[in-house]
Amino acid sequence: MHYGQCPKKAESRNQTIIQTYKDKYGANSIPTQAQYWTMCGRCSYSENQLEIGCEPYQILQSGLIEPTQFHGVEIDKDIYSWNSKVNNGMNWHYGDFYTTMIEYSNENTFNPAIVNADLIHMPKHAAPYISKIMMFLSTVGIEKTMLICNIVAEHRYLRSDIKEMCRLLESNTNYQMANNVAKWEIHSDYYWYNGTQKVESTGRSTKMMTMIFFKGEL
Ligand SMILES: C[S@@+](CC[C@H](N)C(=O)[O-])C[C@H]1O[C@@H](n2cnc3c(N)ncnc32)[C@H](O)[C@@H]1O
């Protein structure tokens, strides 16, 4: 089974992205002119075939988006090369997630209804990265954006928690500025799930936590 097909990952996407969007906005799909941006990982293993169960497959199946609304960014060139062979109108980008969104917005209409920052970092690195994404999203795009942030909470013998994540965010200048220029609301629930891969040395799974933010009208 490939990473993107993992049932725990599928359930977390269902709860944190699909259901949360539908509940929050009372809509079964994002607006026609809006986009879905994600750090997508590998979504194809054979020429021009979207892997069943991967993130875009699941989000398309849910009815939330149409293929052309999908923007998948990937920093690993091999993964990007495989993804870009899927030729059904979806948009594949190679590069850093944050930088790619900025570059895209400089040349195109950047209109994200959903941004999925599916990070592989613990809070120390996740907090500054999320903060700069929030600062950027505060000044561009449509008024309503849902930002999903997956953060590694426990890995090997490293431990963190939501309190540390909140403390790091609140002390970050970009996060503070983002909250000054836009109206951000934090979802009251934090979602926890075991990551998909066991660490060999410990036999434990990586533990993930999800924070969800909503940018609203000022
Ligand atoms: C957790 S996986 C994505 C899983 C996918 N969103 C899903 O739901 O199945 C994270 C992916 O992001 C890529 N990645 C890591 N840092 C990145 C960055 N700064 N910009 C873009 N992609 C990045 C990794 O190579 C990896 O494939």
Image (cartoon, rainbow, N blue to C red):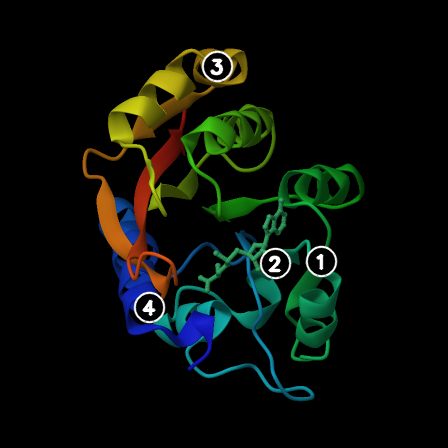
Q: Which residue shows up at 38% across the image and 14% down it?
A: 170
Q: Give percent across and percent down for residue 129.
A: 55, 31
Q: In this view, does 125 lie above or below 57?
A: above
Mark 2 is on which residue type? Answer: His
Among the two numbered marks 1 and 2 on one chain, the one whose residue lies closer to the N terminus: 2
Is residue 194 visible in the rendered structure shown here? Answer: yes
Describe the element under mark 1 as helix, strand or loop: strand
Which of the image's four quarters has the N terminus?
bottom left
Above or below — where is 148 with respect to 4? Answer: above
Asked whether residue 218 is in view, the answer is no
Quickly name the residue at label 4: 10
- Give the camera-side residue of 79 and 29: 79
Q: For the residues carrying marks 1 and 2, which lies nearer the camera in this image?
A: 1
Q: Which of 53 and 197 is in front in this view?
A: 197
Distance (Cα) linking label 3 and label 2? 28 Å
**Image mark for residue 71:** 2
Q: Is mark 2 on a helix, strand or loop?
A: strand
Image disc number at residue 93: 1
Farthest residue, direction left: 189
